[in-house]
Image (tube, rainbow, N blue to C red):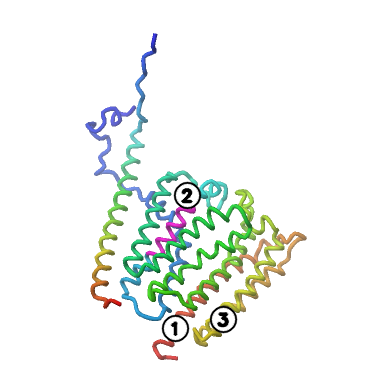
Amino acid sequence: MPQPQLPVEAPSMSKEEEVEFYRRRRGRNIGMLVVLIALVVIFFFITIAKLTTPGP
Amino acid sequence: MSDLMRRGATAPLAVSPLHATTDWSELRDWFALLKPRVMTLVVFSGLVGLLVAPGHIHPVLGAVAILCIAVGAGAAGCINMWYERDIDALMRRTARRPMAAGRIAPEAGLAYGVILAGLSVALMGLATNWAAAGWLLGSILFYVLIYTVWLKRRTPQNIVIGGAAGAFPPIIGWVAVTGHLDVLPLILFAIVFAWTPPHFWSLSLWAHEDYERAGVPMLPVVAGARETRRQIMLYTVVLAPLGLLPTLLGLAGWVYGVYAISLGAGFLFHAWRVLREPQDATGVSLVRDAAARAAFRFSLLHLAGLLGALTLDHWLRTTGIL
């Protein structure tokens, strides 16, 4: 007789782990936002510099 | 299983992300993966290459070029930490690195390094020229493939050949301005190349236990402290005249020449002290490697002084003061 399949449980997080998870994710998200803004600013200024520099 | 896990996306959050305080420690880890302390020297030598090059570069593009050199070097350091996380965990000096300590997943660290490497090369090409981008890519590949993967665990000459990786920034800075290679950046490459072995071997004289534990064949581990002292002296003897070469070839003035003679003589003095330090029959210091520690500190001053003097000399001559 086939054995009944037990449901596979997802790994659990305690309340402390959840707090830690959100604190770390928030830091990571802010870091990513800063990098993306920096890239936009860099590309903007590269474009302006290239446009105002006489070519070869 | 927690309530959050059981009910999936529909579960009311036990902790609102909006009210969670921010944990910056992970961001600090991501930054530490770029080896910021090594980056300082890379940025400085790249900046010198850029400043002493003939011609003009828009300040914004020059700043972006330096940023690319820094990020490229950081990316190479990050991939190096990914590859060496097993031996890093065995050494006291490196055991707390993010991947070695398990705070950042290895695959995430590798992806971060590869993405930053690609981004820095592409940005360098777009901002300056593709020759500089090619040199930057070459330096990253050299550090990762030649030094990290091929040499470091195989030969006590790892530092000698691998030192070339750290010698590329002046070339990259120069090519970013001019678009081509010349004699002076090649001499700067040679100076940093010859400077690296006595600099690292001075450090490894007192940090060799770490390398021994990790099985890295650094010179003091394989050939002993006595031979390491001799090699430090030999490379410093080569380095001193190399430092003077820009003045001898007419590529720099007497201001730089005076600095080169003084700093070269200073490094020779320190190398001599390392060689003659009170030691036992195998060359192990009897005075806690005081001379090697002093030589290591002086080596940092030596290279920074030499590169700074070259920039000062260039500025004095181009502004007509001299």
Residue drawn 34% across the image and 67% down it: B64
At label 2, counting other C-alpha atoms closer than 10 Å, the crowd grade (few under 14, some 14-19, many 20 or more) is many
Instruction: Using the image, tell me which numbered label, if any, was put on residue B314.
Output: 1
Q: Which one is in front, B251 or A40?
A: B251
Q: Secondary structure at mark 2?
A: helix
Could you give the CA–CA distance between mark 1 and mark 2, rounded to whole angstroms?
40 Å
Could you give the CA–CA distance between mark 3 and mark 1, rounded to whole angstroms?
15 Å
Q: Secondary structure at mark 3?
A: helix
Q: Chain of mark 1?
A: B
Q: Earlier in the sequence, mark 1 or mark 2?
A: 2
Residue receiving disc 2: B82
The segment highlighted magenta reads B68-81
Q: Which one is in front, B33 or B290?
A: B33
Q: Earlier in the sequence, mark 2 or mark 3?
A: 2
Asked if residue B132 shows in the view, the reply is: yes
Is the stretch drawn in magenta largely helix, strand or loop? helix
Instruction: Using the image, tell me which numbered label, if any, was put on residue B244.
Output: 3
Examine the structure image and report whether residue B15 is included in the region drawn in magenta.
Answer: no
Q: Chain of mark 2?
A: B
Residue drawn 41% across the image and 65% down it: B134
At label 3, counting other C-alpha atoms closer than 10 Å, the crowd grade (few under 14, some 14-19, many 20 or more) is many
Could you give the CA–CA distance between mark 2 and mark 3, rounded to whole angstroms?
39 Å
> Could you tell me the amino acid type at mark 3?
Leu
Q: Chain of mark 3?
A: B
Answer yes or no: are tags 1 and 2 on the same subunit. Answer: yes
Q: Position of residue B3 (x, y in %)?
A: 29, 28
> Could you tell me the amino acid type at mark 1?
His
